[in-house]
Amino acid sequence: MDWNMKWLLLEAYFYLGWARILKKMPFSKIAPSLGDHMGETTYEANSKDKPVLYSVSQAIHIMSRYTLWESQCLVKAIAAMKMLEKRKVETTLYLGTGKDDQGAFVAHAWLRSGPYYVTGFEGMEKFTVVSKFAKKTKQYKVEGDNYCEQSQS
């Protein structure tokens, strides 16, 4: 394993812990930090993002098995979202509900960037999306000779 992957695993461990702390808070308090509610990012592929998406997905999946706390779908999705936000990669976090094989109510979360699913893709087709959060990168527009930053959540 190269040093880049080792650092990525350490970062994943940190963000999984941070996301687990967030999960203990009331959802109404953390929802604004997740992005534009009911928004979505593009489904268009960005070839430069694919290696980053793969590495972050792999790091999250590996480290979630070794945390001392529960690191299931929502924790993994939030951690991956924050890691990709740091790398200026747009993501959409989905929250879905459904029923398990016994008919009990269950919830699931997954994260998408472009056409790629980063976390939670296992079984997501069984769930109905009830909420989503788009985390878009900052875009710039030209006004005269100046660049103006447009912040988009």
Image: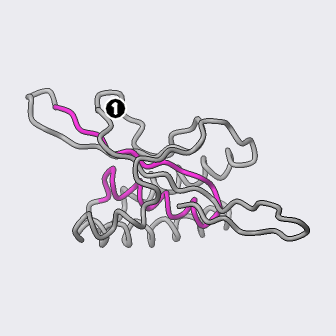
Left or right of 121 on screen, residue 73: left
- Local crowd size for mark 1, using a 10 Å CA cut-off: few (<14), some (14–19), many (≥20): few
* Color scheme of the displayed model: one colour
Image location (x, y in percent) of residue 95? 32, 45
Image location (x, y in percent) of residue 136? 58, 56
Q: Residue at x 52, y 61 (%)?
A: 153
Q: Which residues are magenta?
A: 71-99
Left or right of 90 on screen, residue 125: left
Q: Camera-side residue: 65 or 22? A: 22
Image location (x, y in percent) of residue 152? 58, 61
Q: Camera-side residue: 17 or 35? A: 35
Q: Residue at x 59, y 52 (%)?
A: 90
Quadrant where the image shows the N terminus = bottom right
Q: Quadrant of residue 142?
A: bottom right
Q: Camera-side residue: 2 or 59? A: 59
Q: Camera-side residue: 24 or 140? A: 140
Extreme-front residue of the structure: 144
Q: Residue at x 24, y 71 (%)?
A: 25
Extreme-right residue of the structure: 145
| 30 versus 44 height, above or below | below
Instruction: Provide the secondary structure element on which disc 1 rests.
Output: loop
| 47 versus 31 height, above or below | above
- Residue 94 among those drawn in magenta: yes
Q: Mark 1 = which residue?
A: 123
Image location (x, y in percent) of residue 30? 33, 68
